[in-house]
Image (spheres, helix red, strand yellow):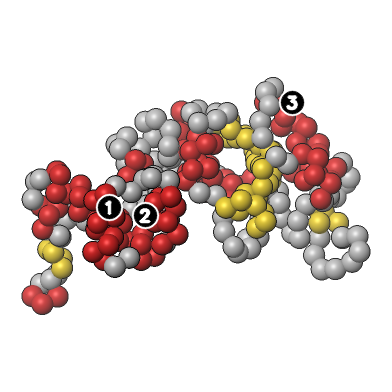
Amino acid sequence: MRFDVVTLFPELFGAPLEVGVTRRAFESGQVQVKLWPLRDFAEDNYRRVDDRPYGGGPGMVMLAEPLERALAAAKADRGAPAPVVHFTPTGRRIDQALVREFAAGPGAILLCGRYEGIDQRVLDAHVDIELSLGDFVLSGGELPALALLDAVARLQEGVLGDARSHQQDSFSDALLDCPHYSRPEVLGEGEAARPVPAVLLSGHPADIARWRRERSLELTARRRPELIAAARATGKLTAADEKYLASLGL
């Protein structure tokens, strides 16, 4: 798959695509990323890509013409249709289900806004999907774009050391992930000692699986009860799950 990124700050994409396990997806070409520096598509001597908003007010607005030239170049270079994604607080919140959709698709053209925003005529004419990281405001669309790229890359075959890793992620089964433990077996000494839960040392896979499922259910019910409601509505909770939740009074 291929992602084309239209951005004022292509340098922000350097290290995140070159470090960590997800770099495997980018180095191998499983996920191709091509950057389109927006100032390359400005035609005046100052390489201007923004101007004051009509109607007055603070800040600057990204100009339509450089953006449309950049989008046209990206579309022509791809040679095949792809959705244009714009990152904005007004968009659909990114979740794991959406990430899986992108991970199974051909990629997209990612449009990273800055300043007060993008000329609305560009959005009306070219954008297919608007996405958001959450109910807060960032300086631009680069961080959400990087978050999407990372989330998609880690789902590609062979990227994670163990293919089961992403299957146990939060939201993979509509719930939050359970707690995890590693060495030492006991952390600290005396009254301050904090041991690993005994069941994880038992060597009984069924007991361990049930313990992890119950911790996941409890954590989700206490912190994100709406996820429990959604899992219940879609039939993703078993009779054993419901019995355990009932024992918690949740």
Tell which tag, 3 or 1, sits nearer the viewer: 1
Separation of marks 3 and 1 at Cα, in angstroms? 51 Å
Viewport quadrant of the N terminus: top right
Residue count near mark 3 (Cα–Cα under 10 Å), binned few <14, some 14–19, many ≥20: few
The disc, 2 or 3, on the residue closer to the chain's N-terminal end is 3
Three-letter code, disc 1: Asp
Tell which tag, 2 or 3, sits nearer the viewer: 2
Residue 47 visible, this angle: no
Q: Which residue is mark 3?
A: 76
The disc, 3 or 1, on the residue closer to the chain's N-terminal end is 3
Relative image position of residue 190 (x, y in whole percent) = 8, 75
Which of the pair 225/158 is nearer the observer? 225
189 to the left or right of 139? left
Q: Secondary structure at mark 2?
A: loop
Which of the pair 99/146 is nearer the observer? 99
Q: Which residue is mark 2?
A: 176
Q: Which residue is mark 1?
A: 241
Q: Quadrant of residue 106?
A: top right
Three-letter code, disc 2: Leu
